[in-house]
Image (cartoon, coloured by chain):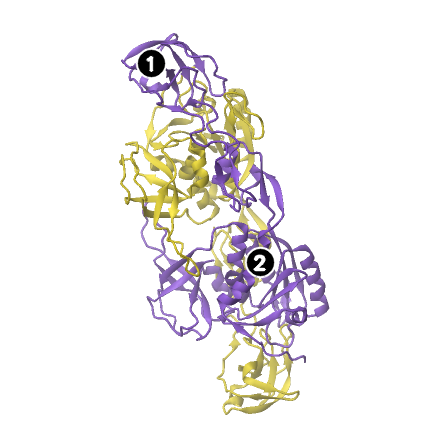
Chain colours: A purple, B yellow
Amino acid sequence: MNPRPASVWTRPVDDYRDSIEQLLRPLAARAVESVPVQAALGRQLADDVRSPIDLPVFRNSAMDGYAVRAESVVIAPVTLPLAGVVAAGAPGRTPLPPGAAVKVMTGAPLPPGADCVIPVEDTHADDDTVTVERGRSAGEFVREPGTDVRAGDLLATARTALAPRHIAALAAVGLPTLAVFAAVRAAVITTGDELVAAGTILRPGQIYNSNGTALAAALAANGVTVVSVSHSTDDPARFRALLSAATSAADVVFTSGGVSKGDFEVVKEVLEPLGGQFGSVAMQPGGPQGLTVVGGVPVLSFPGNPVSTMVSFEVFARPILRHLAGLPEVATYELPLRTAVPRSPEGKRQFLRGKLIRPSGEPPWPLRHPIAVEVVSGPGSHLVASMAWAEVLVDIPAEVSALPAGAIVRVWSL
Amino acid sequence: MNPRPASVWTRPVDDYRDSIEQLLRPLAARAVESVPVQAALGRQLADDVRSPIDLPVFRNSAMDGYAVRAESVVIAPVTLPLAGVVAAGAPGRTPLPPGAAVKVMTGAPLPPGADCVIPVEDTHADDDTVTVERGRSAGEFVREPGTDVRAGDLLATARTALAPRHIAALAAVGLPTLAVFAAVRAAVITTGDELVAAGTILRPGQIYNSNGTALAAALAANGVTVVSVSHSTDDPARFRALLSAATSAADVVFTSGGVSKGDFEVVKEVLEPLGGQFGSVAMQPGGPQGLTVVGGVPVLSFPGNPVSTMVSFEVFARPILRHLAGLPEVATYELPLRTAVPRSPEGKRQFLRGKLIRPSGEPPWPLRHPIAVEVVSGPGSHLVASMAWAEVLVDIPAEVSALPAGAIVRVWSL
């Protein structure tokens, strides 16, 4: 037996999360790489991007129709001689003869001299002439150069995570490549002699190892590249070897298990002598936590229970990782509880799992504002199945020991 | 010159979208494949998934502490002989001798005969005995088998798009692989002689081709696999060749350009004889639209202007594609306009681009409910830059010709 000292500190959730965020924030200064625009979806811009060109590039027609001088159609109907046709993509350099019309397609350059376009609907034409039924003023259905974007205009700011709408705009100004940040790289090490791989038959005392798969999925869903997922027994030499590989390949390392008050806490045993801080955060689930910097690489040590691991990730890691990836903040709501929370441990912030209640009925495009939250889990940390059904974490403050139905709680989207 | 007939129909937005959804809905019956759980993030379950095991698998300790019979600790403090230790992962088959205690780690099997666990915090121990400071009742800190999940319990339903929380739960019950639907496969064909690739120097009359890149990004972001992006000149033979390749490789084809009333409308020219319906939808931007089924494959033909293309995608394709991928519905809100919309074309539904206004101030975890919407675009269809800045489409009903500041409008997230 190898007894460990009881935890030397208990810290509030916000305080501990601040420590983690301070450790991870320097990862904002990451390597920059150039990627083709068409491969940049979800990547994070390294610099502000300005338009290299005016858009429209040239004066062009907003309609399929006839380019004329407005003065030629003041009195309508009027029949004008047809002096040609300009397709989209044609150079369009032949001037419009006075008193004539030139057929133009949407997007085609306006012939020099023309100052408005008569939509094809307001005309009828034969081979040589066009009759205009309704006059137009100068400028109508003409797109002037630079009216959408001027060369030099800011199109997207540094740190933007590129959505399809950004890709559309940056492609439209002809940018072939974009400078983006390398993704944050993470390694995951799970620990515990009792854990075995999915698909094997459980022997007595064994359970399936799910934290590696779960953390890898959670990291990938929040803009992080997972460079390795490995599993350590409770043998410190084995954990040390995996830790060394992880810290040399990743910007941040996540461990699960081995942080509690038991006799075989391999993570705490290896990391505490390296300066790791191990103790309790005043929360349920997820109380036992550890934080170490190994060779400059932050190592976040979560407890091994699957729900504790995932709640720890949500509370401590996800907000800062999304920030680093340029992703939108985690959505939060303040909502009434559908049913009472009969008890909550005083002095500990409790994170229950919940489902959002939405208004019934189906307008043609349903409004999705939730109107309440329903707790789908007990307070325990072993209720993995509830994770599958939960859409949100329900945040019960530390000073609360029970809440009635209808009490307003804060919830965060999972 | 090759004059085309004016469009033969004008249809309301909802009506046209219904036609598209009816064409795409059969894609719900797609091929099923088996993927490892750790590769299943974002994939859509083909079947309901039930747990193959009880969870917890065996009766185990919820705490690091001492397994006892509750009757041994009715009067506390009491000192009990120590009869061993059970680590997590140990088989744990040795029964607890009457009146004794066995040290147990969190997750370790409870020795037969033990009925509660005394947390280590409430004890002190030497090598041979443990003194229990506070009694516990039978069942305390004991996790009974199957209290989280019973073998056969439903964990996730068919059509669920797998989020990290689902992966966590399905990994925890030891499922090595999952049956998921193949993604919907799309091909994109852009058209237009005036379009040139990014990174080339524009000659007079030319513009950059952005719709292929933009549509590919929008498709990928909504759970669709893009099998090809190609560009056709206005030569019908070229378009026909690309169409044939696209319809043989994809479940749905998107085209841009060539659907309007000009003289060189290659998409309409090729597809109308194949039974394509080309006409106007009463909306701005994005009015000219076409819909064809070629060899059983739906072909959606959007107008070529970049903003029209993207608005068409948002309005007609994105909701059904997300539904097919099992992704959450597009978020919609009803919000007051920050400033007036001075005019909107009567009889046409207008989709302006807007930004959400959120409350100022920063609570510790900011509430993200928007409180208003600000229009960032004019009504034109050529304002690509506004797409980059817009977070939402602002939906101005067809019967409205102007709206004052403060009017409630429906907006959809981009």
Residue in view at x 47 percent, y 21 percent: A88
Marks 1/2: CA distance? 68 Å
Q: Residue A30, image x and y in percent?
A: 61, 50
Q: Chain of mark 1?
A: A
Tag of residue A24:
2
Q: Residue at x 56, y 28 (%)?
A: B197
- The residue type indicated by label 2 comes to Leu
Q: Quadrant of residue B96?
A: bottom right
Amino acid under disc 1: His
Residue at numbered disc 1: A124
Question: Considering the numbered disc 2 on the image, is that residue within a helix, a strand or a loop?
Answer: helix
Q: Nearer the viewer, residue B300 or A318?
A: A318
Judged by depth in the image, the label closer to the viewer, 1 or 2, is 2
Quick one: quadrant of the C terminus of chain B?
top left
Q: Quadrant of the N terminus of chain B?
A: top left
Determine crowd level at label 2: few under 14, some 14-19, many 20+ residues with C-alpha closer than 10 A: many
Mark 1 is surrounded, within 10 Å at the Cα level, by few (under 14), some (14 to 19) or many (20 or more) other residues, namely: few
Does B256 appear above or below B234? below
Query: Image quadrant of residue B88?
Result: bottom right
Q: Position of residue B93 (x, y in %)?
A: 63, 79
Asked if residue A366 can be seen in this view, the reply is no
Q: Earlier in the sequence, mark 1 or mark 2?
A: 2
